Amino acid sequence: MDLTVVRDAGIEDARRLLEIYRYYVERTAISFEYDVPTLAEFQARIRKTAERYPYLVVEQKGTIQGFAYAGPFVGRAAYGWSCELTIYLDKSAQKRGLGRKLYEALEEKLRKMGILNLYACIGYPEEEDEYLNRNSAGFHEHMGFKKVGEFRQCGYKFGRWYHMIWMEKIIGEHHCACALRENGVKYKQVLPDAQIQYVDGTK
């Protein structure tokens, strides 16, 4: 039986997550970072994100195959109902539906927090090459995101210029301000650590 588990990430997961992320820094323009962060730096990133937002991993047969997390959009108080999402899968774990499972779980948690707008910042090539294709934009479109902006030739990596696009998904209605966000309630205060198990594709 193929058991897939989506759960909150812990600092103890950092080494495996960094192993996954290393490929995207060193071999692709999906990440615009030039240098792979140290383990301590990556642990600090996880710790800072998890203080306020969900940071999730997906496991199959006990091995982490990917991670996704939310973070502040721009960082000003008025944007408090919006989040930027990030997702990375092990290079050998694509096309298994794991990205969808991660994003569905992340979206559910963010909705319960009172988040209304989701954003993704995605590297986008003029023409696909060995470092960057349009698969991420296609994945987000499949998940209900729509392209809302494009910055032309704003990222330079591997001796080439790349565009960056913003994609958006609205997951709630914009009425009066949400009390959770006004009061600064953090993710850990709203939702306890939990695991979401998928058996044969069912939740």
Image (cartoon, rainbow, N blue to C red):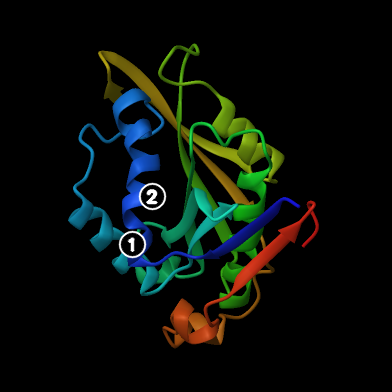
Circle nearer the viewer, 1 or 2: 2
Marks 1/2: CA–CA distance: 10 Å
Query: Left or right: where does residue 159 sit relative to residue 163?
Result: left
Q: Residue at x 55, y 24 (%)?
A: 134
Which mark identifies residue 148?
none
Residue identifier under label 2: 17
Crowding near the residue tagged with mark 2, few <14, some 14–19, many ≥20 C-alpha atoms within 10 Å:
many
- Residue at 57%, 60% (x, y): give it: 117
Q: Can residue 170 be seen in this view?
A: no
Give the percent coordinates (x, y) of residue 28. 37, 25
Q: Which amino acid does label 1 sit on?
A: Ile
Rendered-image quadrant of the C terminus: bottom right
Element on which disc 1 rests? helix
Q: Element under label 2?
A: helix
For the point 20% across and 35% down, the residue is 35
Q: Residue 52 at what x, y percent from top left?
A: 40, 74
Q: How many marks?
A: 2
In the image, is 20 to the left or to the right of 158? right
* Residue type marked 2: Leu
| Mark identifier at residue 46 | 1
**Disc 1, disc 2: CB below 8 Å?**
yes
- Pointer 1 local density, CA inside 10 Å: few below 14, some 14–19, many at least 20: many
Q: In the depicted view, which residue is nearer to us: 189 or 160? A: 189
Task: Tell which circle, 1 or 2, labels the residue nearer the N-terminal end.
Answer: 2
